[in-house]
Amino acid sequence: MSKRRKSSAPAQSYEDFVQKREALLADARALAAHCNSLVPIAKLPDEMLVLIFQINVPQEMNFISSRRRSNYPKDISKETRTMSQVCQYWRRLILATPKLWDLVLDCSTTVPKWTRELMAYSDTLPLKFSMNLSSRGVKRNTENFMMLSSQSHRVGYLEVISGSRKKVEENVFKNLKNPMPMLHSLSLTQTEDNTYGQRMLKEYDSSSDSSEFETFLYTSSTASVFLPDFPHVDACQLRHLKMSRYIFPLDSPVYQHLTKLAIWNIVPAANAPKVADWCALLQHLENLTSLEFVRAFLKADIPEILPDIHLPHLSSLMLRGRLKPCAVFFEHLHTPPLESFHILLSDIQHPVNAMFQRLLAKILDHLTRQKQHGLPEALRAVISKSYLRIINLDPSKASNIDFGVQLDIPVSTPQGPSNVVLDSLTALVDSTDSADQMVNEDHQYPPVMVQALIALLTPYTSIDNLHISLHCASVYLTPLFSHCRGQTQYGSDDSPYMLPIALRQIKNIVIEHMLSFRPTGVWDTLKAYLVWRESIGLPLGALRFKCDFYHRPDVRRVMPEQATALTQHCGKLVWETNHVPSWFQDNLGGEDEAFANEADDLEADPVSDYEEWTDEEF
């Protein structure tokens, strides 16, 4: 039998198919290009397109507090990559624009191969690296860090998060063989939890006479608060430095050129810097524009005489900690009117009158100077139990002027710190109207701490576009609206003032401790206020109820009918329940006020909830 010859038809058909496919793809590309040329965006110049692309790139989120948010993207380059896949023209433009790839490279989450690509796309721009040595991705961290070391001359921003100082010294400092001449921002955050130290500090915060305890705490600690000096520190000129728990020696060259300095949560140690040491350092940092001291002043042995600190370029200040060291530091700090101003003082149960009055005098003088310069765009002030907090937010982070007033459970002791604050502030405020604006104490509203807040905010009551966010415990709701409603009608010209500010200016209301909320009477009072706000064309923006859930019949997980009926009279209504553990329920007393007091004491920081509801939920 003769062999069958192989047919060449299939090969010819395949070649024809490939040719037709290429022709169709060419036609499709031509059609797509023609369609793209017809849309308005195709007529924009490259520079305008790049600006649009930059808007869609997520903003840089520094430090671990931001990175832990649920909405933080694991791959910050996702938006840029998505835009580059729209068309060939966009892809070429995006790949040719290094600033679109100027992103924080997270060594803990980014695949090393993609890290290498991002480093190439960013061309010669300074690199931004973040690494979390506490995460499980040890291999990924190591591979990415090796690439960082090979490009150390390009590193401009470095953030290191670790569980101990040992990891920082061995995994980072020892492996940085080459200098970093472009490094301008450094953040070192230790997340190691010193349970004993934190517990002792908490007890110290709440003790009335803790000088002996404090001496014992710091003299018995053998830990060192200082890290070794940063490798090749002479080769870099840092501008921004943030350190948590541990710091570089105060005589290190790392501080010389700083414009932003943040010191957080210094560990209890015998060699921890004193206030005088920080003052001596700051005398040489005249270029600072931002300063943060958060629980950085640990020792109480403060000298009577400290040098004055002049920071002529400072625009942002955050000061949080115990009253005595913070007050002494703030008293010797001289700055221009600040754009961002945040003070939170604790441990003021038994303040020294002279020191406390000087502190309040300087705070009030600073706020008054701010008003004269027209700087305040968003001011919040909270006085709660033994806490005093004044916040003047960065104008770029707020669209409206926003006063937050927290009305807390009354202080049980009649001669507590509230009276001291009230006496000091009322003596300092230069206004004959401030005393008349305070509600009679017989009505038990507002409590004396809130009256102190009234005096403090008096210089700002003339702001026309003022908006108030009222944070109120439920025990005050009936006295508040009943008192104002009993004197005159809401809409009359001589309408009474709640605090020094009209009721019409309230933007949002948050009502806490719903366990003490009576089901009768107060609903009608609240509804009357909401209806009145509607009648004057200023409906309340948001109303939020916060209920401590004790498994009691008068406290419900679901929104009651009375609250549901108020929905139509305000912009947004939220009924929120917070579960209280069983061990706490067993200790509850029989009075509503007692329930509310104990529930309030569960909060480690009485103003933490305040920040939560003032952000974006309303």
Image (spheres, rainbow, N blue to C red):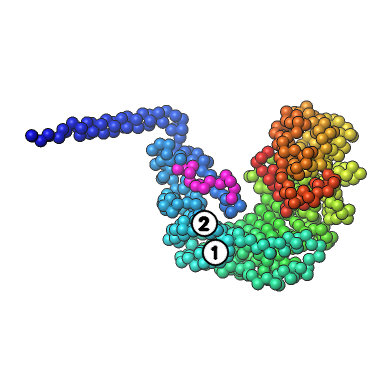
Residue drawn at (83%, 60%), measured in percent from left and top?
350
| Magenta stretch: helix, strand or loop mostly | loop
Q: Earlier in the sequence, mark 2 or mark 1?
A: 2
The quadrant holding residue 112 is: bottom left
Residue situated in front as seen by the camera: 323 or 172: 172
Residue drawn at (44%, 45%), measured in percent from left and top?
97
Alpha carbon distance from label 2 to label 1: 16 Å
> Left of 193 or right of it: where is 483?
right
Please name the residue that numbered disc 1 is placed on.
168
> Left of 218 or right of it: where is 426?
right
Which residue is the extreme one toward the left?
1
Q: Amino acid at mark 1?
A: Val
Answer above or below: position of 64 versus 461. below
Residue situated in front as seen by the camera: 139 or 468: 139
Label 1 element class: helix
Q: Horizontal and vertical percent for residue 109? A: 50, 52
Nearest to viewer (mark 2 / mark 1):
2
Please name the residue that numbered disc 2 is placed on.
136
Label 2 element class: loop
Answer above or below: position of 363 versus 79. below
Residue drawn at (38%, 31%), measured in percent from left and top?
33
Q: Amino acid at mark 2?
A: Arg
Asked whether residue 74 is drawn in magenta, I would say: yes
Asked whether residue 4 is drawn in magenta, I would say: no
Residue drawn at (89%, 42%), measured in percent from left and top?
443
Which residues lie in the magenta part? 68-81
Which residue is the extreme one toward the top?
535
Residue 7 in sight here = yes
Residues packed near mark 1 inside 10 Å, few (<14), some (14 to 19) or many (20 plus): many
